[in-house]
Image (cartoon, rainbow, N blue to C red):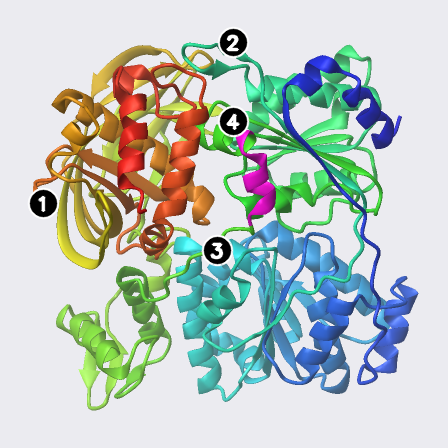
Amino acid sequence: MNVAQILDQLEKDPDFVSHLTKWRKEPARPARYAGFPEALNPKLVAALQRRGIHDLYTHQREAIEAVLAGEHVCVVTPTASGKTLCYNVPVLNRLLTNPEARALYLFPTKALSQDQVHELKHTVEDLDVKIGAFTFDGDTPASARKAVRSAGHIVVTNPDMLHAGILPHHTNWIKLFENLEFIVIDEIHHYRGVFGSHLANVLRRLKRICAFYRSTPQFICCSATINNPKEIAERVIEKPVRLIDDNGAPSGERHFLFFNPPVVDMELGIRKSSVKEAARIAKQLLMHDIQSIIFARSRLRVEILTTYLKKAVQDLNKSGDLVCGYRGGYLPTERRAIEKGLREGKIMTVVSTNALELGIDIGSLDVCIMTGYPGNIASTRQQAGRAGRRSTISLVIMVASSAPLDQYIVNHPDYFFGQPPESATVDPNNLIIMTSHIKCAAFELPFVEGETFGLDAHSTRAILEYLAENRILRHVKDKWHWCADTYPAEDISLRTAAPGNVVILDTSDNGRVIGEIDLFAAPTEVYENAIYLHQTAQYTIDRLDLEDRKAYARPVVVDYYTDAQIKVDLKVIDILKQERLAKADKISGELSVTWLPTMYKKIKFGSHENVGWGEIHLPETTMHTTGYWIEFPENAGEEAELSEKALGESLHALANTLRQVAPVQVLCDVTDIRTHAMVRAPFSDRPTIYLYEGYPGGVGISDKLFTHHNRMLDAAISLLASCTCKEGCPSCVGTALEVGHHGKRGALKLAKLARAE
């Protein structure tokens, strides 16, 4: 059976069709070709033709010509549109004319790096010239590292390794830096928020070292479809780029289905498990030998789905090896074997976290199932692009969960299909992140008087003087030298803004490190008696030592997880923007947030019922960050016909809803934003809802929330009005237990009050 027959079968299934909120057919699109540029080396053209590439798509030719003309470029086309050739062709073309030239490729994950080197080596073999293309990451054996430094024409790595393993040791990489002509940054849309802010600063250090070795590399960036690729590329590399986004690659006919599982408890708004529904649909595909990928939102869900499907396939008297999981935590050799099995058709179904959202070559799959909304339009499009890579008919099914964001999207499919992808956010000048990298840069090369690092010379000098006062740098004549004993890059994780992480140790296995968590999240994630989930294994935390930055854990088997309850104290430090609306004010500014975990709830897997609680004994944590907030008039309760108690419940309910719909408007994760509601905020003595960033200093999300105020409130109003529950449920404002019996109705009134006319 093929995909067309499966579609016909689904269309005739009334039970399945009754739970669809959208069936959208996207027509096939033919390829547009443009030939090879005349400036390319004939030897390279011949090698490409031997590999079956007899013509270039229009966007490939445009990108290659722009690079050959010396421009910095950003190529933005969908998954499987051949972006790899946009940088490999000009790089290899240059190496054929200048064997001393060097290129540095940056990918966000090790898996993607390995995949690209594999592809590159095949092209180099067809060229029949000596061009060294090597990965340099944490998995590179020590014995091979010297060879990579000396013989690597193309060095493929990730930002983390560039930050901690290459830049601080630039004197070992003289050949690379003296001859560096190209820096390729693939999947640049992945570098948003904290990670993107870190990458921008790592590139500032890289350009500084290149200038020291008198090289001026050219940047080639590639991105999946986001709303502001040119802006993000220019903010990250801090150079003007040429945007190339006219996709010439073909695509097959695609059917996009939004499936909302049936309600099992109307009053509580609880639906059938999205995991079980996804497994049920996937089992049908396995019965008919249709190759598919299932995306799950967490590692735990990946393992649960894989378990369900392995049992299902064995019940069909087929091999359990036809189904595999794929996520972080698997050994590199395991991941390579799974990728190969998919390419060769030996694995029929792979269940993955978003690790396979990026462009790793896994061959041509027919169906993509998403277990829950991936969080934003850009990621949804990326995951959908994993199906139908052969210009054949493909099927994409998004199975919604009961979460508010999922319910908003599944019940507003026209919003999803009518909106451009979200805009990514990067703030390279986040003070904490930038200061960390100035320390790293000073370790690599002394700063000289008048030098700038992202900011103007005066601001850069102020940071250098601060570091000198704290005896991290030494100011001698016109230079600032590193003088501390520590090695700065080791203490900085590019994936968080916190200064250093808390490591989680398994006390039953000689203190083996099983994970890490940033310092600001530790008190709410790994407190004493918390249940910590890692690679589907459960651990209980026996002790959290914040001073030594260690959490001590041991394995347990329980049927619940824990959720911390936090007391938050919030102070306004500075107002940056303020706008008076008809019935409220919208504001953005700097906040000081102090939170104290006070207790935790034990929540049963499956039913999500509360089965116990415990106290948390930890000191307060204070963070300076940025936020966006809505100040209601003092008589908001009267305006909305709410008592003081009902007003408090309604503010809390609306805060929950806004936190869930905000990521739809801004390319971020729900966990990037925190909320706090006050009936009488001390700063203004008015009812206020705060949405603040969960990172010290913020990374620009709150500014976007301020800009998208109306769109966000419209989304909240629509979600609240369309939800079928009576008094609030997990699909809109949270449970009635959390927001009381007035929360939902009051939240809807307040949202309408806060909306600008």
Check disc 2 and report the residue beneath it: 264
Which SS class for mark 3?
Answer: loop
* Residue stretch rendered in magenta on the structure: 411-419
Check disc 4 and report the residue beneath it: 300
> Which residue type does callout 4 highlight?
Leu
Residue 578 lies in quadrant:
bottom left
Which SS class for mark 2?
Answer: strand
Using the image as rendered, state which of residue 278 and residue 447 is in the foreground: 278
Q: Callout 3 environment at 10 Å: few (<14), some (14 to 19), or many (20+)?
A: many
Q: Residue at x 24, y 26 (%)?
A: 650
For the residues bearing labels 2 and 1, Cβ distance under 8 angstroms:
no
Disc nearest the viewer among 4 and 2:
2
> Which residue type does callout 3 highlight?
Ser
Q: CA distance from mark 2 to mark 1?
A: 44 Å
> Which residue type does callout 2 highlight?
Val
Counting residues from the N terminus, which is met first, the one under dot 4 or under dot 2? 2
Using the image as rendered, state which of residue 335 and residue 52 is in the foreground: 52
